[in-house]
Amino acid sequence: MPTYRAPRGTRDLLPVERAAFARLERLARELAARYGYREIEVPLFEQGAVFERGIGEVTDVVEKELFRVSPSRGEERERWALRPEATAGICRAYVEHGMQTWPQPVKLTLTGPMFRYDRPQAGRYRQFWQWNVEAIGDPGPAVDAELIELGLRFYRDAGLGDVEVLVNSIGDPACRPAYLAELAAYFRRHVEALPELERRRLETNPLRLLDSKEPSMAALVAAAPKSVDALCAACAAHFAGVRAHLDAIGVAFRLEPSLVRGLDYYTRTTFEFYRRGAEGQQQALGGGGRYDGLVELLGGKPTPGIGFALGLDRVVLALESAGADPVAEHGPVAVVVGADPVDTAGRLAVATRLREAGLAVRADLSTRRLGRQLEAAVKEGAHFAVILGDELAAGDVQLRDLDGASQKPVPLADLVSLLRRKTAGA
Ligand code: AMP
């Protein structure tokens, strides 16, 4: 057993897995740009209050899972927390940088690690990666549909063809209080059947009972009053608009009346992405919703917003379990080897020139024999070996085609154009 190991709930992404993540990140970036979202970075940690206020004190994410950071030294007595999600930080940045004066909506995207101090299990890590997309300053409902379609496209382009979206509306401050009262009254009638945590939540945040992780709650939740039946006229019209826009662009969706999402800031539209047949198993691939009150909660002017967070880890796991081919890794085009075992400087100099010209090249920097250097080049899948030998005095090197095993002397001066031509398939 090694002395030092990655912390529980984290893992190293070794090159093959990192390549799978990188492919998803590239896809996310490319799609975000195509849909008009611009990249933003916010810190990996924030004042704890950004999450407590933004996400809500009585949520799993803040109550149980917030990764708090309290430096024991220094003048700064700030209570920080690692970001459990990106929306609160992005909205904090929106307010801090006066983005309400920019043309609205401000469409932002971010890909990066998030942290939740949860009990680790399959598909649930303490450090995981999300792709976030946020459209701030647009009340919808058209943008709601646009975002949902973007999420589905991501999964399809990533290679998961069986992802479906579950959609709901949870109302707004006009209609939610009455609905919450009705919901609380319903659960109070069944208080004997509620587990301890759910009883506490009944008094602080009854909506959360609907996405309880307790299996014993399933039947109660299924029979609970539905938010969609309690929407005010404005919320009902908004939700009808979302559905009409989804229909108009041919996006199939499933209405899921108990979909409330784990964070307090959501209003109106909520949605989650699942693989068909895997819903209800805490296996959401991603989710999002509208957060029309969040910017104001964080000190800004009232500003509507909507976004999603798609977990990349679960997509990689799903692709692996579906038997998708691992992403091809590209080895070097050429390896520079030498007959003089100690002349590493000569090999490095040639490799540097080739890299400067944009070629993917490794220099063998060992002092092993030429034969061994060539064996290593073959093993790592290089197409060519550039061999430095006696001809170097006349300005020539040997170029060996490792695939075809042919070899010929070429002028060092021609090497770049020759390799470029050969790697371009000419
Ligand atoms: P949430 O904000 O909790 O809805 O998370 C959005 C997505 O991020 C989920 O659907 C997951 O794909 C992913 N996710 C959330 N928490 C974790 C975690 N602890 N480990 C891995 N992925 C996660």
Image: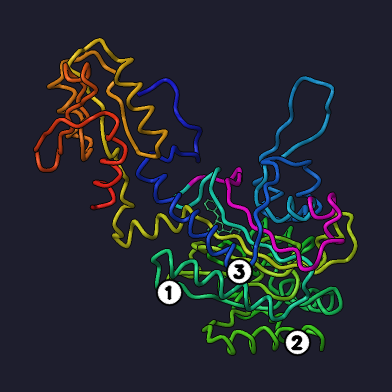
Q: Position of residue 196 (x, y in %)?
A: 67, 56
Stretch of the chain drawn in magenta: 93-120
- Where does the N terminus fall, quadrant-wise? top left
Q: Position of residue 335 (x, y in %)?
A: 26, 31
Image quarter for ligand 1 equals: bottom right
- Give the residue number, with chain letter if any, for mark 3: 35
Residue 18 or residue 345, whichever sits in front: 345
Q: Label 1 belongs to which residue? A: 276
- Disc 1 to disc 3: CB gap under 8 Å: no
- Which of label 2 and label 3 is nearer to you? 3
Mark 1 and mark 3: Cα distance apart in space: 26 Å
**Amino acid type indicated by mark 1:** Arg
Q: Which mark is residue 236?
A: 2
Can you tell which mark lies on residue 262? none
Q: Secondary structure at mark 3?
A: loop
Specify whether 19 is left or right of 244.
left
Asked whether 97 falls inside the magenta stretch, the response is yes
User: Residue flagged by tag 2: what amino acid is it?
Assistant: Ala
> Looking at the rendering, which quadrant does residue 366 occupy?
top left
Q: Earlier in the sequence, mark 2 or mark 1?
A: 2
Neighbour tally class for label 2: few under 14, some 14-19, many 20 plus, Cα within 10 Å: some
Check disc 3: other Cα within 10 Å, few if <14, some if 14-19, many if 20+. few
Measure the C-alpha gap from mark 2 to mark 3: 27 Å
